[in-house]
Image: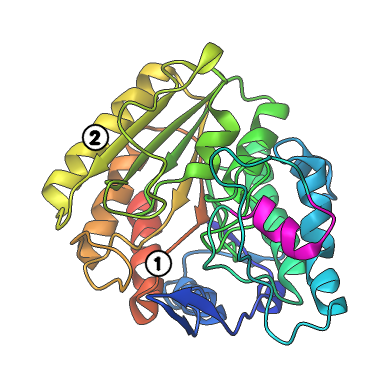
Amino acid sequence: MITVFSDAHRLRNARTELHAGLLVTPHECPERASFVLDRVRAVGLGEVIAPASYGLEPVLRVHDAGFVDFLSTAAEEWAATGSRGEAIPDCWPARRMTQRRPTSIAGKLGYYAMAGETSITPGTWQAARAAADVALTAADRLVRGDRAAFGLCRPPGHHAARDLYGGYCFLNNAAIAAQYLRDHGCQRVAVLDVDFHHGNGTQDIFYERADVLFVSLHGDPADAFPYFSGYADEAGTGAGTGFTLNLPLPRATAFDRWSEALASGLTRIREFRADAIVVSLGVDTFAGDPISFFRLQSADFASYGRMIAACGLPTMFVLEGGYAVAEVGVNVVNVLTGFEQP
């Protein structure tokens, strides 16, 4: 399996994250990608290649142009105010307030942020652009006939909606890749999100569409970030009714119950008759992850890689979450090797 990787991810190196009432060292850090890449090479998964450059056109197929423009200039606009810390929003257009884009960078941060933990820093935009190119290059391998590819993306993407960032995400790598597959010959694409946290951004992008099926297994949003998205009764709207499947799960879910939910999701993907699968591969379902509450063990990741492979479809994997840094590489690559050796 080809792995696509860019060192530009290191340009995203935030110093602060709002967590548990404190500004802490971010859980989403450059070491995550390094551990995964080291493990890819250690097991001989396959060739590691650099991404091609695709420009903004594929990004703008799923993201709002004003939002993309905001991301591209936010760090510079923030620095120009003389602010000493990293750019973090402190005011949002909450219920019954005007949904109008301000001109102030402080106002724009709140307008475009879906949560307040994620700072924007110098280099964030460049790293996010590189991550999108990583995902697009992996998608293009499927277009060219490969059975599988791995986009080692950082920063992650599945919380980024059409015009919102947050949850460590800026551009939605999985959605950009799924749209690229649709634009290059796939009639139906399934996005399977196995991250602990609900992929609210991916759901938002495809919620009204019948050509992209979104399936997500995640912590019950009544008790887990992002709290306001991912309930079982969210099933799509308009033409997209029935093409979103949310499978929220409770605290302390272990692999027996989690794998049953995955089997249900894979059955729906088969019924959909997908031409390809994009897997939002978050491994924060691991029992040792510091910001989740599932109980999967490292061997379980290989098991579910085999389950995904049994669909027999071209499949690309995009790195999302996973914050027990020492184990992230093992758990990600276990999924990939399980897929490769069903």
Given residues 62 and 309, the one toward you in this image is 62
Q: Secondary structure at mark 1?
A: loop
- Residue at image point 41% right, 77% down: 21
Q: Main secondary structure of the magenta part?
A: helix
Q: Quadrant of residue 62?
A: top right
Q: Locate residue 50 relative to residue 55 in the image: left or right.
A: left
As drawn, the label of residue 119 is none
Asked if disc 2 and disc 1 are in contact, CB closer than 8 Å, the reply is no
* Residue 106 part of the magenta segment: yes
Magenta-highlighted residues:
102-113
Q: Secondary structure at mark 2?
A: helix
Amino acid type assigned to the residue bearing label 1 in the image: Gly
Q: Which dot marks residue 263?
A: 2
Relative horizontal placement of residue 187, taking residue 336 as reference (left or right): right
Quick check: 274 above or below 40?
above
Q: Nearer the viewer, residue 286 or 229?
A: 229
Q: Residue 299: horizontal and vertical position, in percent? A: 21, 63
Q: Earlier in the sequence, mark 2 or mark 1?
A: 2
8 displayed left or right of 14: right
Residue 36 appears in view: yes
Asked if residue 104 lies in the magenta stretch, the reply is yes
**Figure check: 183 above or below 123:** above
> What residue lies at 17% left-to-right and 55% top-to-bottom?
251
| Of 62 and 115, the residue lying toward us | 115
Residue situated in front as seen by the camera: 68 or 111: 111
Front of the two marks 2 and 1 = 1
Res 322 label: 1
Q: Amino acid at mark 2?
A: Ala
